[in-house]
Image: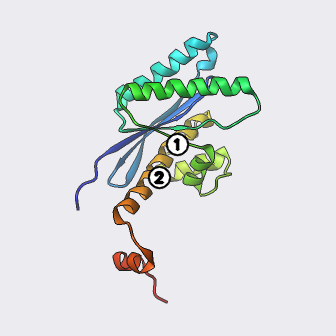
Amino acid sequence: MPKQPVSIILGIDPGTIVMGYGLIKVEQNNIALLEMGVLKPGKVKDNYKKLQLIYETVSGLIVKYQPTTFAIEAPFFGKNVQSMLKLGRAQGVAIAAAMQHGLEVTEYSPKKVKQSVTGNGNADKEQVMKMLQHILAFKDSPKHYDATDALAVALCHHFQNKTAAPAAEKKLKGWDAFIAQNPARVKKK
């Protein structure tokens, strides 16, 4: 069996007040936490300086960890147009930093991220964090859920690619073909 390449995934939960980031390393289906944390651009008064800080932070993480992929949470649609505009700018700057470093960008809705990590698209932030602690074997609870949200985005990306790739390779036609190629998965009563 050929050795699978090492994959490092950078996940971002964009924001102009608090931006979360999380990095995981996937090697031979072992998933390890590299780093998670938050940037607090909200402390900076100038809106354009906030965007510059986001760009520089994302670029710095990319230079430091050399991720192979970049995943970001898509903005949810809120009622406050001004907040949506700011969030969209933060997301755009993070995406621009990733693309400047040659990374392909994948976007996931908050519901998709929760569904992928917990099995429930309506899970709350604490449920997501508890599942991440279980999967990635870390004990400390971060001060901001933005960090675990970003980590969840990275893990969601891994899960989406893990399940999508084998399906594309096999291209099975019906249950008979599936059973023929997967006899160990058949349970006999």
Q: Which SS class for mark 2?
A: helix
**Amino acid type for the residue under numbered disc 2:** Gln
Q: Is residue 153 above or below residue 12?
A: below
Q: Is residue 71 left or right of residue 2?
A: right
The quadrant holding residue 177 is bottom left
Instruction: Tell me residue 129's x, y (percent).
Output: 59, 46
The quadrant holding residue 182 is bottom left
- Label whose residue precedes the other's in the sequence (1 or 2): 1
Discs 1/2, front: 2
Q: Which SS class for mark 1?
A: helix
Q: Tell how many labels.
A: 2
Q: Is 65 or 95 nearer to us in this picture? A: 95
Q: Is residue 2 left or right of residue 141?
A: left
Q: Residue furthest front?
A: 173
Instruction: Tell me residue 172's x, y (percent).
Output: 39, 70
Q: Residue at x 43, y 56 (%)?
A: 164
Q: Residue at x 47, y 22 (%)?
A: 57
Instruction: Tell me residue 125's x, y (percent).
Output: 65, 44
In the rendering, which numbered label is found on residue 160?
2
